[in-house]
Image: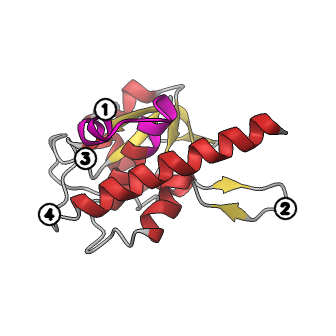
């Protein structure tokens, strides 16, 4: 089976029913995507499939053949000089010191990044709605909200600067 992960074509063993999560973690060694509940409820395993936030623990690998997958490891932007620039959401999570235990954070970040690609100027209610299906056992919801709000503001500033040039 072939698909693209973080910009690189990958070929994996033909086990069509295996959850994408285990292919990413065990076969491709991309361990930033976490196992949480195993039934698609908590959001710790969230990745982007063709730009959509998707729970990888319940996504059979056969369903992603030929598609583009982005994991937390591929979220930062690689600059032309080879350096990395963190995605606005990643930087906002650092700035707000969001993680406590960190287990849910890659899923939180991936959900927020996909959401902000769809809605770069969300209201408070839209942020709460978008992030409401990702669980944080440590209860960092206030910091998560502030980080998503900050990333949205940073994205808006970047977009205005790009339009001005």
Disc nearer the start of the sequence (4/1):
1
Question: From mark 2 to mark 4, how far is it between C-alphas?
Answer: 39 Å
- Mark earlier in primary sequence (1, 3): 3
Q: Which stretch did the figure color magenta?
A: 113-130
Res. 60 mark: 1
91 with respect to 107 (left or right): right
Which-is-in-front pick, marks 2 and 1? 2
How many numbered discs, if any?
Answer: 4
For label 4, the crowd category at 10 Å Cα-Cα, with few meaning under 14, some 14 to 19 and many 20 or more, is few
Magenta residue check for 14: no
Mark 2–mark 3 CB contact (< 8 Å): no
In the foreground, 165 or 63: 165
Q: Residues within 10 Å of mark 2 (few under 14, many from 20)?
A: few
Residue at image point 30% right, 63% down = 143
The colour style of the image is secondary structure
How far apart are the alpha carbons under marks 2 and 1?
36 Å
Q: Quadrant of the C terminus?
A: top right
Observer-side mark, 4 or 1, equals 4
| Residues under numbered marks 3 and 4 in contact, where contact means CB atoms less than 8 Å apart | no
Q: Secondary structure at mark 1?
A: loop
First reached walking from the N terminus: tag 2 or tag 1? 1
Indicate the secondary structure of the residue bearing disc 4: loop
Mark carried by residue 137 = 4
Which residue does the numbered mark 2 point to in the structure image? Answer: 81
In the rendered image, residue 96, in percent from the top left (x then y), is placed at 40, 68
Residue labelled with disc 3: 43
Q: Main secondary structure of the magenta part?
A: helix
């Amino acid at each position: 089976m072939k698909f693209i992960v973080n910009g690189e074509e990958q070929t994996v063993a033909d086990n069509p029913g295996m959850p994408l999560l285990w292919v990413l973690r065990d076969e491709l060694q991309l361990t930033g995507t976490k196992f949480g509940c195993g039934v698609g409820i908590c959001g710790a395993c969230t990745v982007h499939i063709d730009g959509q936030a998707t729970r990888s623990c319940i996504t059979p690998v056969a369903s992603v053949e030929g598609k583009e997958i982005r994991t937390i490891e591929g979220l930062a932007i690689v600059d032309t000089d080879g350096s990395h620039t963190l995605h606005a959401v990643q930087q906002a999570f650092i700035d707000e010191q969001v993680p406590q235990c960190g287990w849910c954070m890659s899923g939180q970040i991936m959900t927020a990044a996909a959401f902000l690609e769809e809605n770069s100027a969300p209201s408070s209610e839209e942020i709460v709605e978008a992030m409401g299906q990702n669980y944080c056992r440590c209860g960092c919801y206030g910091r998560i909200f502030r980080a998503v709000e900050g990333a949205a503001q940073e994205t808006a500033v970047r977009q205005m600067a790009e339009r001005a040039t």
